[in-house]
Image (tube, helix red, strand yellow):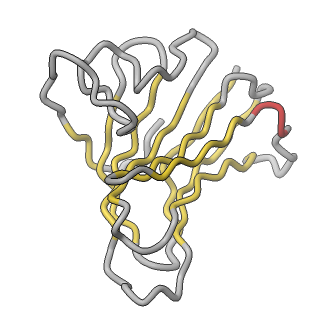
Amino acid sequence: MPDAALQLVQLTCRPTDLPANGLDDDCDGAIDGAPTAASGLTIVTAYRTETAGEVRLALTSESGSPVPNQALEREAQRGPAVALSRLGLSDLPSGRYVVTASRAGGEVDPAELSLAVSLATVGPAQTYLVRLGAGETRTLGTIEVP
């Protein structure tokens, strides 16, 4: 469930996906090849590479129990125009989890970073706009695994 403060963005569908931009450009329900299996969830953040500060996605259990490393697939890519941070959550054990995005502080450019956060599950992918300042951590939402 996305955090109530996130702004849902309606994307205009293109005939084909633009490669490696973290969005479902062709509205087929898949984000640049992210898995769409019923048990899978992939969260992708995308932001312009010229903005200072890497965005990191994190997952914590509300119960305080550790999240098994084998349940997480972390990936970071930096291209000529867009940087992506991807978190795959296909094998999470039962429980409730909080997803956060954080950005390192102390950069020369303290300006807010606009990033697109896309959720790929079964059905259409959803994309949200998030603003993240230098040194800031934002809750993106919660995940409930039965």
> Which is more toward the observer, 112 or 139?
112
- Side (left or right) of 17 relative to 2: left
Q: Residue at x 16, y 15 (%)?
A: 15
| Residue 39 sits above or below residue 101 on the image | above
Residue 126 sits in which quadrant?
Answer: top left
Q: Is residue 5 visible?
A: no
Q: Residue at x 57, y 48 (%)?
A: 76
What is the x, y in percent for residue 11?
18, 32
- Side (left or right) of 100 relative to 10: right
Q: Is residue 97 visible?
A: yes
- Side (left or right) of 104 relative to 27: right
> Which is more toward the observer, 41 or 28?
28
Q: Check the picture and name the quadrant holding the C terminus.
A: top right
| Residue 9 sits above or below residue 121 on the image | below
| Residue 114 sits above or below residue 4 on the image | below
Total marks in image: 0
What is the x, y in percent for residue 131?
33, 64
Residue 23 sits in which quadrant?
Answer: top left
What is the x, y in percent for residue 66?
86, 47
Q: Residue at x 62, y 47 (%)?
A: 98
What is the x, y in percent for residue 29?
36, 16
| Residue 19 sits above or below residue 50 on the image | above
> Which is more toward the observer, 96 or 84?
84
Residue 132 sits in which quadrant?
Answer: bottom left
Q: Residue at x 35, y 31 (%)?
A: 19
